[in-house]
Image (tube, helix red, strand yellow):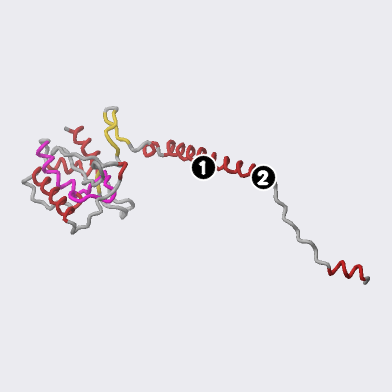
Amino acid sequence: MSSLNARAISRPSAPIEPSVPAGGSILRPALVLFASLTLLVGVVYPYAVTGIGKLAFADQADGSIVMRDGKPVGSSLIGQAFSSPKYFWGRPSATGPMPNNAANSSGSNLGPTNPAQIDAVKGRIDALKAADPANTAKIPVDLVTASGSGLDPEISLAAAYYQAPRIARERKMTVEEVRSLVDQLGEHPALGFFGEPRVNVLALNLALDKKH
């Protein structure tokens, strides 16, 4: 091997400098990707989901609105505060600044030994007894305690049965008629074990008005 070739082999090669693309070549694909994703997840996806909901689940997509005489009277998914003795009363709500506020779903976060919780429960018990003094049955717990959501549209069948004597008296019905209405509209656990037996309060009260 000649001395010239030996020097060429032993000579370190110059470091390869990475090529830096021009600014425009990076910016353009970034903008295209940004616009494409914005169009996909900001326009196409929401409209697709809304369209599928409108077609397959029209009632739920519109808020499960309950109509009477062509006018909306509430939602089957959100409770209402009924206070007249001729209506079924729903579960208490601790949402603020008013009960059953769908924009502020929440519970009271008060423990069972909290004095404020005890006073609230006592007040609800007193209201139930004042509306039906002759009723000596045990008061179901869901009539005097608020839920975590504060929006419960349903009560237990036991809570509905408890109120049957008061409603029968106010509407000149028999207790059996009121209980029969509860049984007709009552819902049982899905598949026999998901959830508890319950009944929608708004549906019950609308059925009462329709019947009497």
What percent of the width, then of the height, locates residue 41? Answer: 51, 42
Badge 1 marks a residue whose secondary structure is: helix
**Residue 68 location, x and y as percent?**
27, 30
Horizontal and vertical percent for residue 200?
Answer: 25, 43
Q: Which residues are magenta?
A: 143-170
Residue farthest top in this picture: 70
**Residue furthest left in the image:** 134
Q: Which mark is residue 156?
A: none
Assess whether residue 35 is covered by the magenta stretch.
Answer: no
The amino acid marked with disc number 2 is Gly
Of label 1 and label 2, which has the lower sequence position?
A: 2
Residue 210 as seen in the image, left or right of residue 62: left
Is 67 rendered above or below residue 16? above
Question: Horizontal placement of 54 versus 178: left or right?
Answer: right
Task: Report which quarter residue 165 is drawn in.
Answer: top left
The residue at the point 16 percent across, 51 percent down is 121
The residue to which callout 2 is attached is 23
Cα separation between marks 1 and 2: 27 Å
Q: Which residue is mark 1?
A: 41
| Type of amino acid under label 1 | Val
Label 2 CA crowd tier, 10 Å (few <14, some 14–19, many 20+) = few
Looking at the image, which is closer to me, 101 or 28? 28
Quarter of the picture containing the N terminus is bottom right
